[in-house]
Image (cartoon, rainbow, N blue to C red):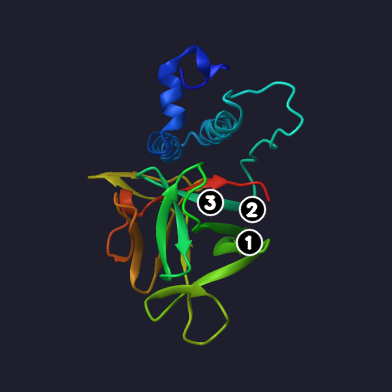
Amino acid sequence: MIVSRRISRNRRAEHVYYNYGINGVLYFTLVIHGYDDEAVDLAGKIKNFLKYKEICPVGRGDMPPPIRLHTGDFQLVTCHGYMLAWDMQHRNFHGVQAFWPDNGLLPVIVRRHGHGFGVYVRIDGKLEPLVLKEDAVVLGTGAPDEEAFVVDSSGSKVGPGNKWSCPGLSVAISSSRGFLVTLPSRDIGLASANNCTWECLALLPVNS
């Protein structure tokens, strides 16, 4: 139902694609169970549907390029189905609708470099680093009191006694305060002692 070529043939599938909470959770769930290719394929179809009302439009000259799985830049989808963003005014992280234009907050981007990742936002076409300074999330300037966020792709716990390791498309982000934790309200905490489901983020490849 979800991957049929013409979504209009099944109204139930249309409701799934229009519901940013459901499609975000679907993407996250595919990633943490190791279905990387299927997750990225779903993301492309959701974006096509939101633009064309078809998941596989034919003969569109302005078609977006297909999402590449092994790219260097990623956005972050939470287990609650929203995406991680940065609130410049309040100097903190917050959640926005997955795949949909939202409230003007800047999507958080992690970029692969060497054997690790950095945490950024895009401003005027340029990636700017985000750091922790005096319990606020701010743009990095290189000052000695700034702390870089650590992006860990080694896996996490997803339930009592259960572990998974998906080095391709799942990470946890931490600092000296603890792990970044995502809440159903879209608020983001920075001081979780756990590394479980709410601390997990699914990487969504973005073309850049």
Q: How many marks?
A: 3
**Residue in front for this viewpoint, 164 or 191:** 191
The residue type indicated by label 2 comes to Gly
Label 1 neighbourhood size at 10 Å, few (<14), some (14-19), many (20+)?
A: few
The residue sitting at 63% across, 39% down in the picture is 67
Element assignment for label 3: strand
The residue sitting at 47% across, 62% down in the picture is 86
Tell me residue 51's x, y (percent): 60, 33
Determine which of the numbered discs, if any, sits on residue 24 in the image. Answer: none
Determine which of the numbered discs, if any, sits on residue 72 in the image. Answer: 2
Q: Is residue 64 left or right of residue 55?
A: right
**Residue in front for this viewpoint, 169 or 6:** 6
**Residue in front for this viewpoint, 207 or 177:** 207
The residue type indicated by label 3 comes to Gln
Above or below residue 174? Residue 37 is: above
The residue type indicated by label 1 comes to His
Q: Are marks 1 and 2 in contact (CB under 8 Å)?
A: yes
Tell me residue 150's x, y (percent): 47, 66
The residues tagged by marks 2 and 3 sit, at their Cα atoms, a distance apart of 11 Å
Determine which of the numbered discs, if any, sits on residue 75 in the image. Answer: 3
Element assignment for label 1: strand
Q: Is residue 196 left or right of residue 172?
A: left
Element assignment for label 2: loop
Tell me residue 134's x, y (percent): 39, 81
Q: Nearer the viewer, mark 2 or mark 3?
A: 3
The residue sitting at 59% across, 60% down in the picture is 115
Please identify the residue farthest to the left as the structure is shown: 160
Sequence order check, earlier mark of 1 and 3? 3
Q: Label 1 belongs to which residue?
A: 113
The residue sitting at 59% across, 23% down in the picture is 54
